[in-house]
Amino acid sequence: MSEYTPSTGEVRRRYAYARSAGHKNQSAVAEFDRWLAAHDAEVLREAATEMDATTGSFNPANPNELAYINCTRIDAQELRHRADRIERNAQSRVPVKQERTER
């Protein structure tokens, strides 16, 4: 038997409903989206830090190992850039419409 896992949309709606005394409103939705963006950015930065840590035992004098180190650093930097974009987009996002609350 598999365990049920709610979707992000379901969690967003439930959070907004709970924060708004039974009425979903856009400020609660935006609050949830900011939290989710901060969480996603944090996860990406943690992954980048872990990737950087994997290069410590390699010898940069060895061309093959240097290639691994360089590629890993580039990938880690890309994760950090994505984290920055996620946070910037979350800060600039404006709610577009009021959603109906399901009852």
Image (cartoon, rainbow, N blue to C red):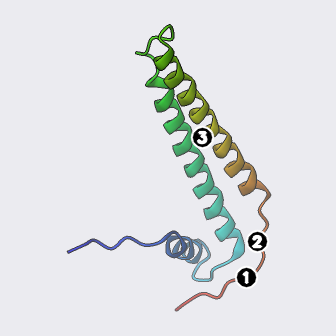
In the rendered view, tell whether residue 79 sits above or below residue 72: below
Type of amino acid under label 1: Gln
**Residue 46: mark in rendering:** none
Is there a contact, CB below 8 Å, between mark 2 and mark 1?
Answer: yes
The residue tagged 2 is: 95
**Residue 98: mark in rendering:** 1
Distance between the alpha carbons at the discs numbered 1 and 3: 33 Å
Type of amino acid under label 2: Pro
Nearer-N-terminus badge (1/3): 3
| Residue 58 pos. (x, y %) | 43, 15
| Left-right relation of 95 to 36 | right
Nearer-N-terminus badge (2/3): 3
Front residue (pair 67, 7):
67
Q: Residues within 10 Å of mark 1 (few under 14, many from 20)?
A: few
Q: Residues within 10 Å of mark 3 (few under 14, many from 20)?
A: many
| Residue 33 pos. (x, y %) | 63, 62
Q: Residues within 10 Å of mark 2 (few under 14, many from 20)?
A: few
What residue lies at 69% left-to-right and 43% top-to-bottom?
84
| Residue 37 pos. (x, y %) | 62, 54
Is there a contact, CB below 8 Å, between mark 2 and mark 3?
Answer: no
The residue tagged 3 is: 79
